[in-house]
Amino acid sequence: MARKGTFYSSSLILFLFFFGIPSLSAEAALKKYQFDIQGKNVSRLCHTKPIVTVNGIFPGPTIYVRGDTVQVNVTNSAQYNMSIHWHGLKQFRNGWADGPAYITQCPIQTGNSYTYDFNVTGQRGTLWWHAHIFWLRATVHGAIVIMPKQGTPFLFPQPHMEFNILLDK
Ligand SMILES: [Cu+2]
């Protein structure tokens, strides 16, 4: 009996190996982003100021994800230690990736990198990410857009276009 049970288990594993898990395989994806935190002169309304940015742009890059797993490698080249928080995201079984400095992690020190690795299974919507230490969130922030499953219709007439609006000080 034990052998028979073992046989069934092996068969199931082989089946999953060759055919995948049907409901998950279409969605499962790995999205990788690189965030380089760096100082940059940025102009707004005719004034130029040195600020801390991600990848030299302000606001920072938008993360688009439809799949399950996101990896964001953060390299901190700024003169301030910091962490990144994924605001509003439910960190199911990814608590270590939540990002508040001195709560779930030590801040990423100048010259060091840290890879946030989390999944967004079952979540959707437009949220934002931001530095989670001191005043750095004022300029180190951006949007994270979690799109619904492929083929999921809108709950309203399909919009002509979409763009993100980020409100900051
Ligand atoms: Cu937040």
Image (spheres, helix red, strand yellow):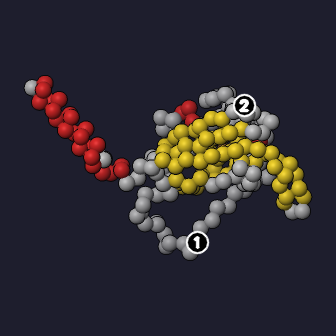
Who's the residue at 63% across and 55% down the image? 62
Q: Describe the element under mark 2 as helix, strand or loop.
A: loop
**Can residue 120 be seen in this snapshot?**
no
Q: At which x and y percent is residue 135? A: 79, 40
Say which quadrant the N terminus sits in: top left
Relative image position of residue 155 (x, y in whole percent): 46, 66
Which residue is painted at 83% across and 55% down in the image?
42
Q: Position of residue 164 (x, y in %)?
A: 64, 61
Residue bearing the label numbered 2: 109
Q: What crowding class fits label 2: few (fewer than 14 Cα within 10 Å), some (14-19), or many (20 or more)?
A: some
Sequence-wise, which precedes: disc 1 or disc 2?
Answer: 2
Instruction: Say if residue 49 shows up in the picture.
Output: yes
Q: Is mark 2 within 8 Å of ligand 1?
A: no
Residue sitting farthest toward the top: 2
In the image, 155: left or right of 111? left
Q: Which mark is residue 161?
A: 1
**What residue appears at the point 65 percent right and 40 percent down from the top-left corner?**
74
Q: Amino acid at mark 1?
A: Met
| Looking at the image, residue 93 lies above or below residue 165 | above
* 1 displayed left or right of 150: left
Provide the secondary structure element on which disc 1 rests: loop
Number of callouts in the render?
2
In the image, taking residue 135 as reference, residue 23 lies left or right, namely left
The residue most toward the bottom is 160
The one of 56 and 161 positioned closer to us in this rendering: 56
- Real-space Cα separation, disc 1 to disc 2, in angstroms: 40 Å
Q: Which mark is residue 169?
A: none
Residue 125 horizontal/vertical position (percent): 54, 55
Residue beneath the point at 75% across and 39% down: 77
Which amino acid lies under the numbered mark 2 shown in the image of this protein?
Gln
Is label 1 in contact with label 2 (beta carbons under 8 Å)?
no
